[in-house]
Image (cartoon, coloured by chain):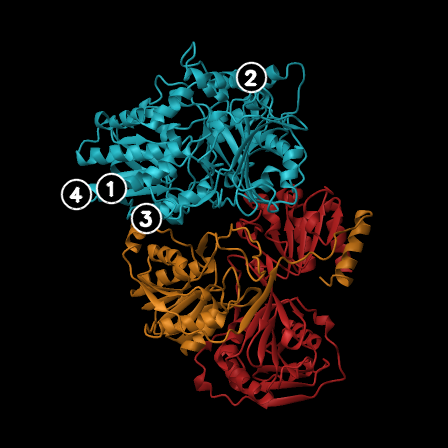
Chain colours: A red, B orange, C cyan
Amino acid sequence: MALGLEPDVILVVAEQKDGTLNRASWEAVAAAQQAGGDVKVVVAGGDVAGVAKELAAADVAEVVALQDAALAMYTPDGFVAALEALIAAEQPELVFFAHTYQTRDFAPKLAARLDRAIVVDVVGIKGSGGDRVYVRPVFQGKLSADVKAKGPAPHLVSVQIGAWRADAVKKGSGAPVREVAAGLDASTIRQQPEAPFKEARQAVDLSQAERIVAIGRGIKGQEHLAVAEGLARALGAEIAASRPICDAGWLPMDRQIGSSGQTVAPKLYVALGISGAIQHLVGMKGSRTIVAINKDPEAPIFEVADYGIAGDLFEIVPAMVAELQK
Amino acid sequence: MKIAVCIKQVVTREWQLRVNENKTWIRDSDASWEPNEPDAYALEEALRLKEKHGGEVIVVSAGPARVQQAIRDALARGADRALHIESDALAAADASAVADALAAALKDEQPDLVLTGLQSDDQGFGSVGVILAEKLGLPHATIIMEVDASSPTLRVKRELEAGWFQWVSMPMPAVLTIQSGINQLRYATLKGIMAAKKKEIRKVEAPAAAEAKQEVVAVYFPEKGKKTQMIGGSPAEAAAELVKKLREDAHAI
Amino acid sequence: MRETLDVDVLIVGGGPAGMSAALRLAQLQQQKGGEPLAIAVLEKAREAGAHMLSGAVLDPSALRDLIPDFEAKGAPLAAPVARDDVYFLTPSSKLRFPVTPPPMNNHGNYIISLNKLVKWLAGQVEEAGVDIFSGFAASEVLYEGERVVGVRTGDRGIGRHGEKKGTFEPGVDIKARVTIFCDGVRGNLTKSLIRTLALDEGRQPQLYAIGIKELWEVPQGRLAPGTVIHTMGYPLRHEEFGGAFIYAMPEGQISMGFVTGLDYKDPLFDPHMAYQRFKQHPFIADLLKDGTLVRYGAKALPEGGWYTVPRVHMDGALIAGDAAAFVNSMRIKGIHLAMRTGMLAADTAFEAVRADDTSKARLAAYQQRIDASSVRAELYPVRNVHQAFGYGLLPGLMYAGFSLVSRGWWVKDPMPSHAGYARMEKIVDYYSGSAPSPDVPSNAVKTDRTLTFDKLTNVHYSATRHIEDQPSHLIVHDTDVCRTRCREEYGNPCTRFCPANVYEMVDDGAGGKRLQINASNCVHCKTCDIMDPYQIIDWVPPEGGEGPSYENM
């Protein structure tokens, strides 16, 4: 398969857990559809016919349910073996993933197994064919890099969560679903996973949050945190803060964003009562959409915001929560 | 236990990021350097495992002569010896090339465990550890919060999304990428610094470079293409307008 | 368990004085042979040079003596001085001095980055086999009676409420036969030595200035590399001492700074604002147009001169460099004197250790060496110059000119002077009749974050890093004074003279104000320790390895 202008086949590797499709997989499908050519989707697991049917709603050439008892629980050894074989059979030009924790765990291994290029954490695709470049963040999102994948096909590409919109997937009239037995030798799988469990995390990794509501001095008092927390709940967002809030002990230090805290670049960053001192900006200005609410219309935060409201957050935020709940 | 820790040297957090003349990377010819912070957690984990189970900790790093500073820092904290794959090119190479070099250096060492940080603060591939495992033919696990090496079968705690975790077992030797913040980084003591000067740093030749799998064609500051849209009106009006725009224009919610 | 280390010579501070002392010792060791000396240098910054900030125009005489082949060895000298101009600024124009005053003539000197020079010197020192322990802050002098026997470094891993964290490491006791203190302007250990051993007995009060510096990148060709410009006048009034420096380096880099005497009378004056005002002058604004701010920093300078130098030798110790105020305030040069005194201290220490006699009597040879050297030859004739400026700009200039001829003579020698902090007037006296807000500097300007900056934005460009979870290293002995007496008498001048926004008076929730210390902003300039009118602020080093990162400053 020569690398022409439109790729011949893009294989999208979807992700599921216990029969539930990971929403991010739709984003990978959307990215593949945007890149053009024939899109095929594969989902691997123990019994994934149901998930495959879900995926078949997309306008794709085919959905492959790649099944094996040994794939019922995810392991990198199992998934790499199964996908290696499928890729050899399908000969796609590109293989797309959503950049989930699971993808990070096995996709580079798959690329090394195939001795092929992999570009991870991609937020944009420009050009086509031999000129195609993938845009990815470097230096924790402070800079962007245009990267070319080199060498023979297939090239593996994992797309950043939220970089493409799940609802941008073109729907079709129902793609054919094909069940493929992966035929794995379970004894070659070296990992033995136990059942996943939930636990309250000791420290929060804000860099993984898709949405963040951040609080600054404008919140005026610890007793008012509830206002911001209400918005965070309504948005499904994590709470974060500028340094003065953490210094005062109103929020733990692992919630701090900025040059002496964490650097984040979520899909949505809502800055409440944050003036926008440069120490804070360097920690969040890579965010995709930035909303700022501050009483002072000259606050520097408005320089980096996509949307700004110069007003009283104590009136605006409850109104937002009401809107969101409609 | 023989534990190998792969560390990368990156520009310091404070280094002002400016694009170089070719626009293919940042200006760093005069920079100050430091060990990649996620790798520091991997090193700390290795040192704790050594304290618990005995053995030795070997530090491995690929890069120009300057990475010796990062290596000495690791030796000062308690690593026993080091391998330096001296190469200018590997400093900004893709993950596969780096993993190739690390695999070649570790080939004769036969470590029980290989640890890396989760990802580097500059490129942020998060892939070297995983590719290295494949090149060494070893099992691996990533984003590790806890390591239990008390039995011949390794048992590690993976972090999953959204507050989920999972224990996984695998035989050693194995490769792990370590999540940041899982332990408190120890200081290098004065005695440690002095001792580090006498510890062995073995120079290892970089393998012949294979074809690059990736090429950075441009590096730039992300443009804020849109101008700030200030939304006016009463609080209720502004809130409604904002939510509408976030839904329909920005697709942020 | 506290670590201990025994050495022959301990050098506290890895600046130009400390590095020169270390290198000189290594050279003497090589030349004279014998039992190898154990030498160690302690430096509080994470790496050598990180806390080094200066204009700077270097007189290479000491460097030439220390390392004759410094050029071949790649000493980082940015540009030889090509031209020297002095301007007097008025609010909207400038008057060039037709002739550069002789002390300001920099022919044969080099524009340098002190940070780069010290980094390079550190390389030479390490190559010579001397251990540099960076990231270790000396916090206490160790005594046996009146004899200095070494230093203790600061504990690491202490939380903000004083609790020991899991990573706690107690400080190290480093014992030495001779300790050479090179801890810089208002060095915390030298300050305590002076107090404990009355080293300033019979000396004139020390005088200081604050230097606020920025490194800019402007379109190339605007100023030829090697151009040296000094200005006086606007925006300072006649009662304020100071002026600006502008040094052009290659590739469009401009080293620019503003020096203000820490002896101003107006309690509402803000040195940082004066610098922003200075940048708004058309001459300067044009120079910086379309430029980018690269780095920011600040540091105090010791200006008192010869009569303010404390006793610099005692049982078991010597003091060199800025810590002992070896600065020629007329030439605005101190690096070569720091290097020279570091070398002389090394000569003295070497000989004393070899003779197995490190007593005060033996170490007095240091003072003799200083008196016989270019240090005295240079500093003695200008011994009263800075003090003359205490009487105003005009008297200062007149005396400065006069002193060139009179070799420093004056009817009253030493010329009477007073400590700077004591000259600050109370609001009620300075502003008799009006009641200005204590929260607004008298020389405030609106900053635009392109040419001029607020302190918090500026601090970001100093790349200062401190662990937040540690006790404050700015020790204010009685914060009640801040919200009561000081607020009324002086309007909390610390909120103005600190160039890093460390001190803020915030609402205390009960209608009044309280002092908030943002310790992690601190750039280690020492101005607060110097200028606080009640002298109740003690700057002590934060955890080792922290502070600003003065790349190329």
SS type, badge 4: loop
**Mark seen at residue C394:** 2
Question: Which badge, 1 or 2, comes first in the chain's sequence?
Answer: 1
State the SS at label 2: helix
Q: CA distance from mark 1 to mark 4?
A: 16 Å
Circle 1: residue type: Val
The disc, 4 or 2, on the residue closer to the chain's N-terminal end is 4
N-terminal of the two: label 2 or label 3? 3
Q: Mark 4 vs mark 2: same chain?
A: yes
The answer to whether residue C367 of the structure is visible from this angle is yes
The residue under label 3 is C126
Q: Which residue is mark 1?
A: C7
**What numbered label is drawn on residue C34?**
4
Q: Nearer the viewer, residue C133 or B56?
A: C133
Question: Between tags 2 and 3, which lies in front?
Answer: 2
Q: Is residue B237 above or below residue A169?
A: above
Indicate the amino acid at tag 2. Leu
Looking at numbered disc 3 in the image, what kind of residue is underneath it? Glu
> Do pointers 3 and 1 mark residues of a single chain?
yes
Do tag 3 and tag 1 residues touch (Cβ < 8 Å)? no
* Element carrying mark 3: helix
Horizontal side of A218 relative to A251 (left or right) equals right
In which quarter of the view is residue C436 placed? top right
